[in-house]
Amino acid sequence: MEYQDIAIGLDVGTTKIVAMVGRRNEYNKIEILGIGRSKSIGVHRGVVNNITQTIEAIREAVSEAEHSSGLKIKEVIVGIAGQHIRSLQHNDYITRLDFENVINQKDIQKLIDQVHKLVMLPGEEIIHVLPQEYKVDSQAEIGEPIGMYGSRLEANFHVVVGQISSIRNIGRCVKAAGLNLAGMTLEPLASAEAVLSTEEREAGVALVDIGGGTTDIAIFKDNIIRHTAVIPFGGNVITENIKTDCLIIERQAELLKIKFGSAWPGENKETEIVCIPGLRGREPKEISLKHLSQIIHKRGCEILEQVNLEIKNYGNEEQKKRLIAGLVMTGGGSQLKHIRPLTEYITGMDVRIGYSNEHIAGGENGLISNPEYATSIGLVIKGLDDKKKYLCATDMGHKHDENHTSEFISTKFYNKNRKLNYEENSDHSKKKNKTKSKSFLEIWADKFRQILNDTE
């Protein structure tokens, strides 16, 4: 099996690190060849706070994935999230001197590069520049301007920003674990690839990924990414509150939440009690299920109120921006009992739980399609799509598939992460790069590689 046929997603989360190996079959479904999972003890709210522990956890997950797949993992595409992520809207334009010729990819890249020059806050770096609608001269709401005539090219952009130190730390952990970095992708956008349909993106939908340390949000409308946000609270906040209020250890609090917890306290009676074994010969502790559900309900409401605020900040109350498809929940936190009706109550929107069934090959659903693996599957999908686009572009003699669909526009930014291959540090690769004129993919990769090299 050739490595160009497979992709490896690495989800570095707060509670777990997952390495997933996958490929597309003849039916365009994802076959999961191997999966590895380890406990994440060096990451807090999506940010690395212990380099050594994170490296070891990555190695453990990758080793398990190698054993289950029978393949040697050389490069990975990594998800990035964390409380340091923020986004903003920006409008920019360029004036074309050669307006006698049609707009081409160089013009679009020139405009994107101009956005990358925006002055950020100290210590911040632009992660993604996502084109939304274009405007050519006086003609607005253009999805794809390539091939059109015009002297002024203007666009609205969704810009995702993060802390340079946090980005470098993740890159350093991956490299120290003996892996090459094929690219980084914002985790809520990866999750969206795994659980959202094209119809939902078109109608308008909010993806809410409740992880262990953070809750990630991605909002789509007209098949274009409109808003992203990372809320620095997740399932661990609920577990921590259960531990503190009930005076038990974290492992017991997590088990209580999963097995007996509910986000809707009205269903439990005062007489419903669960007995927790005592520590070191101490008496067992009795926990009221009603009290337990009240704790979960309170913290769940706090998280969902923040989600609702982000949806309002996007502008869902405007008729034109209305999210017709409602809200899709995924991640480990979405499996909490009665979290769906609580979300519907707080947001006033239709809610469904997002599974990856439609992307996974038959016979492999079950555990793998579980919402907690949505980000990992999405990273595999993006890795495979990046390779396919790059190979197609190379075969056709250009670096972009000039597909005139809005879906392609909304995912263009992923291509920036390409061109970091298995021979990244080899002499052959260096000579090859010197003899060819660099595309914008290679220029961006060089810039990203330089950031990672600075960490060494």
Image (cartoon, helix red, strand yellow):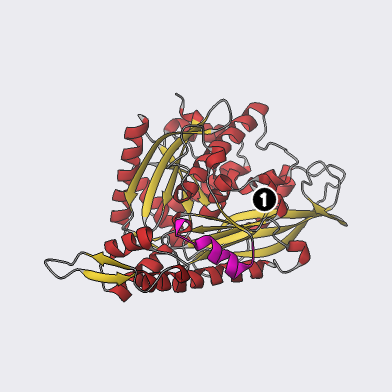
Residue 300, image x and y in percent? 47, 69
Asked if 142 appears above or below 43 in the picture, the reply is: above
Q: Using the image as rendered, state which of residue 142 and residue 273 is in the foreground.
A: 273
Asked if 237 appears above or below 103 in the picture, the reply is: below
Please give the name of the residue rendered at 77% of the width and 46% of the height, measured from the top-left corner. 144
In the image, is residue 347 part of the stretch drawn in magenta? yes
Mark 1 surroundings: few (<14), some (14-19) or many (≥20) residues within 10 A: many
Please give the name of the residue rendered at 56% of the width and 32% of the height, measured from the top-left corner. 435
Q: Which residues are magenta?
A: 335-349
Residue 265, image x and y in percent? 45, 70
Determine the residue located farthest toward the left in the rendered image: 281
Please give the name of the residue rendered at 85% of the width and 52% of the height, measured from the top-left corner. 151
The residue type indicated by label 1 comes to Glu
Element carrying mark 1: helix
Please give the name of the residue rendered at 37% of the width and 46% of the height, measured from the top-left corner. 175
Q: Which residue is mark 1?
A: 200
* Number of callouts: 1
Q: Provide the major secondary structure of the magenta segment.
A: helix
Q: Quadrant of the N terminus?
A: top left
Residue 79, image x and y in percent? 48, 51
**Residue 223 visible from this viewpoint:** no
Q: Using the image as rendered, state which of residue 399 and residue 339 is in the foreground.
A: 339
In this rendering, position of residue 172 left or right of residue 434: left
Residue 131, image x and y in percent? 69, 53
In the image, is residue 317 part of the stretch drawn in magenta? no
In this rendering, position of residue 301 left or right of residue 146: left
Asked if 453 appears above or below 269 in the picture, the reply is: above
**Residue 103 visible from this viewpoint:** yes
